[in-house]
Image (tube, rainbow, N blue to C red):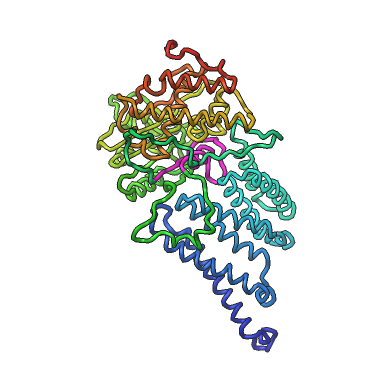
């Protein structure tokens, strides 16, 4: 510089390379930090900003590859800094998945996160006496684990958890930090999350088979010729988790995780189809999404929930359905009410730290007032102006049975049992049985049958038989003469068709099971399904007994169910 130091000897071209790199690096950080200021709801405002951010990161990534030697020599580029750029690109792809619900972007995030590990970009971090750099590495591991969980790469998850555990031990040993408990909690959460499934499917060598529960091409029963169903399609879904004490990882409870997978198709690899997201959809005519758009809301307040709900409602395209999934602690009415309106049956809990005592108990200021931090059935009435499909998994799900269809639009509520037989209650931390039936009906069937593991060959045989059961349930629904038309109006959509057939299978299974003997042990729906034509249909009951026979668990089911009522 002024003293004519070594920097004066740097060739002009190399100096420009360093200047250009610094510009791109600063610009990328500025744009990335701006992402958190974008509204989380609404599907259009964010796209151009995301596109610009991807543009800069793409240029930055290619630039450091092309000029690595100059940057090593003249800028002092360290491998962890390259890792940071790759990690940010992985985060961008993951957030693009969250914004669009396109599972293909998870594969892109996985590619970048995986490259960081394979190329050991963070390996030298532990040699530097800077705890904040180690925290960057730990956060990278946590993010990578989330992506692997969502892609069902459980073998990789287990390796990452072991590596993360070693890294945390080294970090806490070297630096006397206050966040040791926090990082150990992350390890405990992910360990509990990967053990949430109650049944293991095993290969012949006793390795665990990883089963995917996203919609495959053969997943939903096909519509046969002559089936008259609606043309509505599922466009938007709110997945809400507010169960106290349920296993969760990274603001995703087990129930939320299972439901989001039930609303997604199997991912494809996008590498050959795209350069960067954000530029794929034309502003004038967006291409139709493969998956319904989703909002994942972990323990939202009433205000947050209503804001996202209103945004979804506002942007719902014509001939489309909004799905609301509620997995939450029940809020029950206190005292007696003279009326039986939509605010008199309680509902499910929304988040307010002030009013939650020991998890479930609600502190009441006045017995005559309604609970403020509760989503009452009446709160959803304004949104029934458009087709609405509601799933409630809660100890007070039946509050939503008291709906009134004010606007004549298609409206269906699928409601969980409000209590389970005592033999099954200890599993609630690992996710609800009702949601498991909607996500993986065979695993749920095995669980209620008392089975905890199964060979792959038998699993596949049972899956094939379950597909036949689903086809027959579809026929029962579409041939019924007394079914409410709302069910049929939703039946044209693959995702909703699968949820409806699984709901009926769940309900029929529980009604035939010997230990499910109380009314509160059974799922319900609004409008009510004609029992004799669906959940208590003898043809369906025969199928369930046949499935039980294949598994050699027929003894846990009633043979002559109808005679027992």
Q: Is residue 178 magenta?
A: no
Q: Is residue 494 above or below residue 516?
A: below
Residue 544 percent location from the top left of the image: 49, 22
Residue situated furthest top in the rendering: 563
In the image, the segment drawn in magenta is 236-263
Residue situated furthest left in the rendering: 407
Residue 295 percent location from the top left of the image: 44, 47
Q: Residue at x 45, y 52 (%)?
A: 100
Q: Is residue 251 magenta?
A: yes
Residue 293 percent location from the top left of the image: 42, 48
Q: Nearer the viewer, residue 133 or 275?
A: 275
Q: Nearer the viewer, residue 461 or 334?
A: 461
Q: Nearer the viewer, residue 485 or 17?
A: 485
Q: Count every numbered label the image shows and give the total.
A: 0
Q: Is residue 33 above or below residue 75?
A: above
Q: Residue at x 55, y 72 (%)?
A: 24
Q: Is residue 164 left or right of residue 393?
A: right
Q: Is residue 514 left or right of residue 122?
A: left
Res 534 visible:
yes
Residue 79 percent location from the top left of the image: 68, 65
Q: Nearer the viewer, residue 147 or 306?
A: 147
Res 333 visible:
no
Q: Is residue 467 left or right of residue 534?
A: right
Q: Is residue 540 above or below residue 268?
A: above
Q: Quadrant of the N terminus?
A: bottom right
Q: Quadrant of the C terminus?
A: top left
């Amino acid at each position: 510089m002024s003293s004519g130091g070594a920097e004066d000897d740097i060739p002009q071209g190399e100096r420009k390379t360093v200047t250009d790199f610094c510009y791109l690096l600063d610009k990328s950080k500025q744009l990335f930090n701006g992402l958190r200021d974008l509204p989380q709801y609404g599907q259009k405002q964010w796209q151009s900003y995301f596109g610009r951010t991807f543009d800069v990161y793409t240029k930055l990534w290619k630039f450091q590859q092309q000029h690595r030697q100059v940057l090593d020599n003249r800028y002092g580029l360290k491998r962890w800094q390259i890792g940071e750029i790759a990690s940010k690109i992985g985060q961008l792809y993951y957030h693009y998945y969250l914004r669009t619900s396109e599972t293909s972007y998870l594969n892109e995030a996985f590619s970048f996160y995986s490259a960081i590990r394979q190329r050991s970009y963070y390996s030298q971090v532990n040699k530097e006496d800077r705890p904040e750099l180690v925290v960057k590495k730990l956060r990278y591991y946590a993010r990578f684990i989330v992506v692997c969980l969502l892609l069902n790469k459980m073998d990789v998850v287990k390796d990452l958890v072991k590596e993360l555990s070693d890294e945390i031990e080294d970090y806490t040993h070297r630096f006397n930090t206050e966040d040791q408990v926090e990082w150990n909690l992350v390890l405990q959460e992910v360990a509990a999350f990967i053990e949430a499934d109650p049944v293991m499917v095993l290969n012949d060598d006793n390795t665990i088979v990883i089963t995917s529960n996203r919609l495959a091409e053969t997943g939903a029963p096909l519509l046969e010729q002559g089936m008259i169903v609606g043309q509505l399609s599922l466009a938007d879904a709110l997945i809400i988790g507010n169960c106290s004490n349920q296993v969760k990882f990274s603001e995703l409870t087990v129930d939320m995780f299972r439901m989001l997978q039930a609303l997604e198709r199997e991912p494809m690899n996008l590498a050959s189809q795209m350069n960067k997201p954000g530029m794929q959809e034309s502003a004038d005519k967006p291409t139709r999404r493969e998956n319904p758009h989703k909002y994942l809301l972990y323990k939202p307040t009433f205000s947050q929930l209503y804001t996202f709900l209103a945004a979804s409602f506002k942007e719902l395209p014509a001939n489309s359905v909004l799905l609301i999934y509620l997995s939450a602690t029940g809020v029950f009415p206190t005292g007696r009410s003279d009326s039986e309106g939509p605010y008199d049956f309680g509902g499910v809990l929304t988040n307010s730290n002030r009013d939650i005592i020991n998890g479930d108990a609600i502190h009441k200021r006045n017995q005559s007032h309604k609970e403020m931090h509760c989503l009452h059935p009446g709160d959803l009435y304004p949104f029934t102006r458009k087709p609405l499909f509601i799933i409630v998994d809660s100890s007070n799900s039946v509050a939503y049975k008291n709906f009134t269809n004010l606007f004549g639009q298609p409206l269906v509520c699928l409601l969980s049992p409000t209590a389970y037989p005592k033999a099954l209650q200890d599993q609630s931390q690992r996710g609800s049985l009702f949601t498991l039936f909607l996500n993986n009906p065979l695993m749920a069937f095995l669980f209620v049958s008392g089975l905890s593991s199964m060979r792959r060959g038998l699993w596949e045989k049972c899956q094939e038989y379950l597909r036949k059961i689903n086809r027959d349930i579809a026929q029962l629904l579409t041939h019924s003469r007394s079914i409410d038309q709302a069910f049929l109006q939703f039946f044209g959509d693959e995702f909703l068709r699968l949820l409806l057939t699984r709901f009926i299978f769940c309900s029929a299974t529980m009604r035939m099971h010997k230990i499910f003997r109380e009314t509160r042990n059974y799922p319900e729906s609004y409008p009510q399904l004609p029992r004799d034509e669906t959940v208590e249909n003898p043809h369906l009951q025969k199928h369930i007994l046949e499935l039980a026979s294949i598994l050699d668990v027929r003894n846990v089911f009633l043979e002559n169910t109808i005679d027992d009522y």
